[in-house]
Amino acid sequence: MRDPAPVTSPDDIPFRARLAAAARQEQFLTVVSREEASARFRAAVPHAALPAETVPLADALGRVLAGDIASPIDVPPFDRALVDGFAVRAADTQGAGAAAPRRLRLNHEILACGVAPSLSVDAGTATPIATGGVIPRGADAVVMVEQTEFFEDALAIDLVQAARPGQFIGYAGSDMAAGETVLRKGLRITAREIGMLAACGLAAVPVVRRPRVSVLSTGDELVPAGAPLPPGGLYDSNGPIVAASVTENGGEAVRLGIVRDDAVALSAALAQALAETDVVVLSGGTSKGAGDVSHRILRELGPPGILVHGVALKPGKPLCLAVADGKAIVVLPGFPTSAMFTFHDLVVPLIRALAGLPPREDEAVQAVLPQRVASELGRTEFVMAALTRTPEGLAALPVSKGSGAVTAFSQADGFFAVPAARSGVEAGETVSVTRLGAGLRPPDLILIGSHCVGLDHVVGLLAERGVRTRTLWVGSAGGLAALQRGECDLAALHLLDPETGRYNAPFLAEGFSLVPGWGRLQGVVFRPGDPLFDGGDARAAVAAAVARPDAVMVNRNVGSGTRALVDGLLGAKRPAGFWNQPRSHNAVAAAVAQGRADWGVAIATVARAYGLGFLPLTQERYDFAHAEIARDKPAVAAFLAVLAEAPTRAALRGLGFAMEAAP
Amino acid sequence: MRDPAPVTSPDDIPFRARLAAAARQEQFLTVVSREEASARFRAAVPHAALPAETVPLADALGRVLAGDIASPIDVPPFDRALVDGFAVRAADTQGAGAAAPRRLRLNHEILACGVAPSLSVDAGTATPIATGGVIPRGADAVVMVEQTEFFEDALAIDLVQAARPGQFIGYAGSDMAAGETVLRKGLRITAREIGMLAACGLAAVPVVRRPRVSVLSTGDELVPAGAPLPPGGLYDSNGPIVAASVTENGGEAVRLGIVRDDAVALSAALAQALAETDVVVLSGGTSKGAGDVSHRILRELGPPGILVHGVALKPGKPLCLAVADGKAIVVLPGFPTSAMFTFHDLVVPLIRALAGLPPREDEAVQAVLPQRVASELGRTEFVMAALTRTPEGLAALPVSKGSGAVTAFSQADGFFAVPAARSGVEAGETVSVTRLGAGLRPPDLILIGSHCVGLDHVVGLLAERGVRTRTLWVGSAGGLAALQRGECDLAALHLLDPETGRYNAPFLAEGFSLVPGWGRLQGVVFRPGDPLFDGGDARAAVAAAVARPDAVMVNRNVGSGTRALVDGLLGAKRPAGFWNQPRSHNAVAAAVAQGRADWGVAIATVARAYGLGFLPLTQERYDFAHAEIARDKPAVAAFLAVLAEAPTRAALRGLGFAMEAAP
């Protein structure tokens, strides 16, 4: 909500009041421990399977059996032949041999599958029978057609081998006996169980009703995917990710979309959700910021109402748990990682219990932490980690993108907890990493360092050849350090050595090799048409801009190659915007494109992507390093091969990168 | 097709011709190796992802990305506040401290989420901002509201701590940069990826089209679940299990139902399937038995037509692979286990390749085989196995229910192969067991031995308490042997010692204990109203029946307790049906109920379930044995506790079992 009134107007009163209200909201958070939050939630909301419903067998895949299943029939329903041949009396075949064949007259019926026998097998006779055919009365064995001689004219067969009683007969009920419990309550139905239920003749099965879970996103800033993004707007990712997670955990997501931070709209949506579904999950609306109204709505619910607002979890502190009409209402924090941790920690167990599913079996692995992770005393802190294999075993690399990142979950293999009683975990300590999903196959190639869109292209080519790469963008120096600790196969780097003026090679320790990548053109970026820069020389234009107090720059983080360039341009000057030091070319370009800054330094490819003007400064080298002994590792060899191929190099050139002559 | 003509009629000619035709069908099988079959199939049918289609994001869960996804925008789209507080210029805060607070005037706007800033943060000013709010021009840091003092009248704040440039700012593109490849082709979309795609604003994504797979079952004997079962009829289980497996492997099953063994009907169904779907899977119709027509239809297809008919696989030999219009047609064997092995071995890889999924990652474990498994030289033999934990490690117990069994797959944890070049695997050898599914949790309790419906009830009670039991019905003696080898926790047995006349206890070795189960009443079963048995004494009635040549009995397998009873009744007599020796009470009752035999011996509970008459003979003891050292194992203790409880005993009594006074 924009406040249109100028500072000096009498409308200062509502502005003051709103500021004061924002300050007071802090009081709503009464932080309890994770254990206390969970205990209150479980006490107030039954964590038990919903009642049964009956579904057709064809719709039962993935559902949970609501009761034991006893077979209503014998399977097979009758004694049957296990081979193609003849049903005989074993006693008639005793003493048969090559020298003394036994002749049996054929009864006048052929027992194909599905044919009910009409004739007995009397002494001295046999009846032709197909695999699966019903054993006729009198017969107690089947002889294979291959072990008989057929006399068409005499309608008889000769046997040269005695048959064992019961031979090649599958008895009624030997697979499932009538009345036998064949499947148990609580089982999740897979294809295997579908087959058993079908064989029993069951066309419908009792299954636990799926919990219906309302999913609402609240926030005036949110826009649904596909709509244009207004200034300050954000695409809603919590709604879709929560809905998909509900589905993955046996629930049925009812998507109620984005609701504005408006008490009337939110009350109406909540009433609808409570009337129509079993659980309500809102996301956003629990921070202390102005404009959040969901906690106010929840305070007006009947008892027990709000159970918890504030949990000693990081990320996830502003979580709110409430109950109305016996149904759980959960308000997740708005930031994606916070939302996902709290959802998995407290909501997933409820959904699975309602769905009749057992708790998710989180597979934990032990891994060594290569760097210290600090944590605040008094709250449980979850840290996302990527697992990599080192010569000494598994290492857990913290993936620290912040609780606002939606990518953290997909770049990590799992997470570990720093207990509330500790202020951190030291480098070299072993942590227990809870894996995010069973069956996550480790990557073939791990590449850590600096990001480049050219590298995206190369990794895509590798994927087409079946090589799966994990990339972690931690910057050049971080990549090099990870490589030297044995945590990755390749480091991507563009580090300028100020003493020699050379890129990358001066930083490599013994035992490591550099693979030439490509040159990237660095330059000054600006909005097209800005008279300060248009058409001039980069250095001259920057000097002019620095002299003007109304021109705002955007810098880069210390340690990046680009920052060294910026420092060279500025000397001792500290123009407006100097302290804005983001970590990527893209962030620089975005700041300029959106008018938050007027100029910065970034690579040409990125300038082009953002439609910015560009004045060239210098070429930098973006290269790859690997341990010499890893050169022949298949995935590394595949990377080097792809990089050397002419079509790859042509494509990179097309993206605007400077390729050396082929090595 | 029943042949109505009597043996002596002139219609013998068609009967003879049909017999001769059945004999000739054998020639159709030209058996090739598994490797050769796979090579021909891969050469003739492209095993590659189908073309892309675009689906809405809400329908993308579980689908496979058809191309790399580059983010079209920066995520976040702007520099934003990571906490609730005030956007400031870090330079303004330098030197602030408790003794020297810095005062900043508030700009007249509140930057809630979704609000585009209209005012710059000039020197000496600050703008209130919520978590997620857009950083205004001029600001390069955010200070937390908790670390400020707010002066409502002055519209100003005091800071007592300096702010670092960039503090609490999340930069544009720091999560996903515009143009950055964020997801790669071939990835299966989970909730995590849904979140990333939504955050990029993508409302629709390119995914690999799902292969449409026609599923037909052929056979005159087949009946769909839910329909009444005619004599000789069988419920179709292959159709449902194949359809469910297609779904599980990324395909879309198109169920064309049951087609009769009729060339016209089958041709029509096949033409429809080829026109509308990508792959055609038939089951049944490949055995050599009379009445199978599918191979005839396939021989009439244009080239290349039939690629393979007959593979050196056990089970699965009669598999048929064909191609028409560039589409694969697979005829699976009719028996369920054969159908499933061949489907998983040859069809699943095709479906996954068409769906763009990687090969299924079969997890293999090493386990010791406790008993010899024989195998035929010259063909690869697959053996289903249940895994159990022994003191020495994992053991693989073959689950040998025969290829006709639909339960084999669900009682097994996996399977191992006996190579074509070997005639078997010896006891004590280690085999590599391919697990049937990731995440199959090993059971808490393993119980092997003789089946009883009373035990079904007890196991159900355990399941309600969270104890998962695996039961394997191998008979009393087999259960006892498994217990002594350490392969199970409990053996269920009812073995009569003929010398002492006592049940079970005499068979136990030192170190094993017997837990009293219950008494089961054995008796003679017969169809109600049969004058031979109605109302008489069991022994007298059997004596009368044995004297009549038209009265057919059904026996039991040697080694079962019931067989000892039967032997006592018959003495040296061998009446008709003596050699029919099935392995279960249910099979005996089914034979009598269906008129294949007139009498047999079975327990009262089963007689009642089949609506049979019953003349009591004797009580037998059905007990449980365990190793003495295992008594305190939690799952064993839980079993013993449930068994001893009064409600359990009352329920078993209600089922007709004789319970001793509570121990």
Image (cartoon, coloured by chain):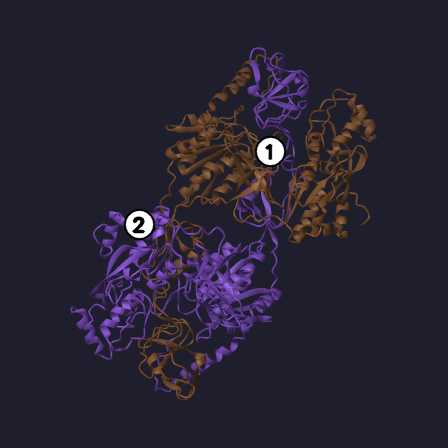
Chain colours: A purple, B brown
**Disc number at residue A180?**
none
Residue A408 placement (x, y as % from top left): 42, 61
Residue B199 placement (x, y as % from top left): 39, 61
Q: Nearer the viewer, residue A378 or A370?
A: A370
Q: Amino acid at mark 2?
A: Leu
Name the quadrant containing residue A610: bottom left
Q: Which residue is mark 2?
A: A640
| Residue ranking furthest to the top | A153
Near mark 1 (Cα within 10 A), the count class, few <14, some 14-19 or many ≥20, is few
Name the quadrant containing residue B375: top right
Please indicate, yes or no, whether residue A252 appears anywhere in the rendered image: yes
Q: Between marks 2 and 1, how big is the CA–CA gap?
A: 50 Å
Lateral position of residue B320 relative to residue B395, left or right? left
Mark 1 falls within which chain? B
| Residue ranking furthest to the front | A510
Mark 2 falls within which chain? A
Lateral position of residue B202 relative to residue A340, left or right? left
Q: Nearer the viewer, residue B42 or B240?
A: B42
Vertical relation: A575 (above or below) A605: below
Please indicate, yes or no, whether residue B107 appears anywhere in the rendered image: no
Lateral position of residue B379 relative to residue B89, left or right? right
Secondary structure at numbered mark 2: helix
Vertical relation: B201 (above or below) A645: below
Quarter of the N terminus of chain B within the rendering: top right
Secondary structure at numbered mark 1: loop
The reply to whether discs 2 and 1 touch (Cβ–Cβ < 8 Å) is: no
Lateral position of residue B129 relative to residue A297, left or right? left
Task: Please check whether the numbered discs 2 and 1 fall on a single chain.
Answer: no
Residue A291 placement (x, y as % from top left): 44, 74
Near mark 2 (Cα within 10 A), the count class, few <14, some 14-19 or many ≥20, is some
Q: Which residue is mark 1?
A: B372
Q: Amino acid at mark 1?
A: Arg
